[in-house]
Amino acid sequence: MAGIYFEDFRVAAVYHHEASRSVTEFDNIWASCMHLNTQPLHLNFDFSEKKGAHNKPLFNSLYTLAIVIGQSSQDLTRGTLMENVLITDIEFPLSVFAGDTLYSRTTVKSLGPDTEHADAGMVEFLHEGRNQNGEIVTSFTRKVLVRKRGSTV
């Protein structure tokens, strides 16, 4: 499915994204190393067991955000996104662990013009990532610049 053009978004519209992703120990170690995140709570089973709050490694939160955004991109912005502008209000109410499956949904919070690009508009999303039990593991607001229909950029 191609992304949605600016004119086709509606405030309060909710999108349940079909793409889902079970996360693994390899994902966690790989992402942490790629980000140069040497936090032992992600990489060291012994440390996590003895000194962590959950007795096992926590899944990398930046990778959790990336997965949720990626799940939404197929439905919302593939081919229509011009750029990410702002990500705010990031929350992680529950921890993610290897073996969890991530699902996501997006609500359109607001729409507005972009003063620099006549052929695009600003869309504000509320993204929510949920685990296999339907519990919210992350939520955040993201503003993106999206092409208008007929844009030549």
Image: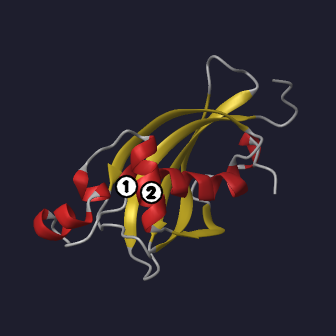
Give the class, few, some or many, for how many residues have Cα within 10 Å of label 2's Cα (few <14, many ≥20): many
> Image point 70% across, 46% down: which residue?
77
Residue 137 in the image, given as x and y percentages of width and height: 37, 66
Q: Is residue 132 above or below residue 54?
A: below
Q: Is residue 6 above or below residue 113?
A: below
**26 or 61, which is in the foreground?**
26
Q: Are marks 1 and 2 in contact (CB under 8 Å)?
A: yes
Give the position of the C terminus as an image quadrant. top right
Give the class, few, some or many, for how many residues have Cα within 10 Å of label 1's Cα (few <14, many ≥20): many
Residue 47 in the image, given as x and y percentages of width and height: 17, 61
Q: CA distance from mark 1 to mark 2?
A: 6 Å
Q: Which residue is mark 2?
A: 64
> Image point 58% across, 37% down: which residue?
144
**28 or 149, which is in the foreground?**
28
Q: How many numbered markers are drawn? A: 2
> Image point 73% across, 21% down: which residue?
118
Q: Which residue is mark 1?
A: 60
Occupied quadrant, residue 1:
bottom right
Q: Could you say whether the residue bearing mark 1 is in a helix, strand or loop?
A: loop
| Amino acid identity at mark 2 | Thr
Q: Is residue 104 above or below residue 147?
A: below
| Amino acid identity at mark 1 | Asn
Does residue 48 appear to the left or right of 75 in the view shown?
left
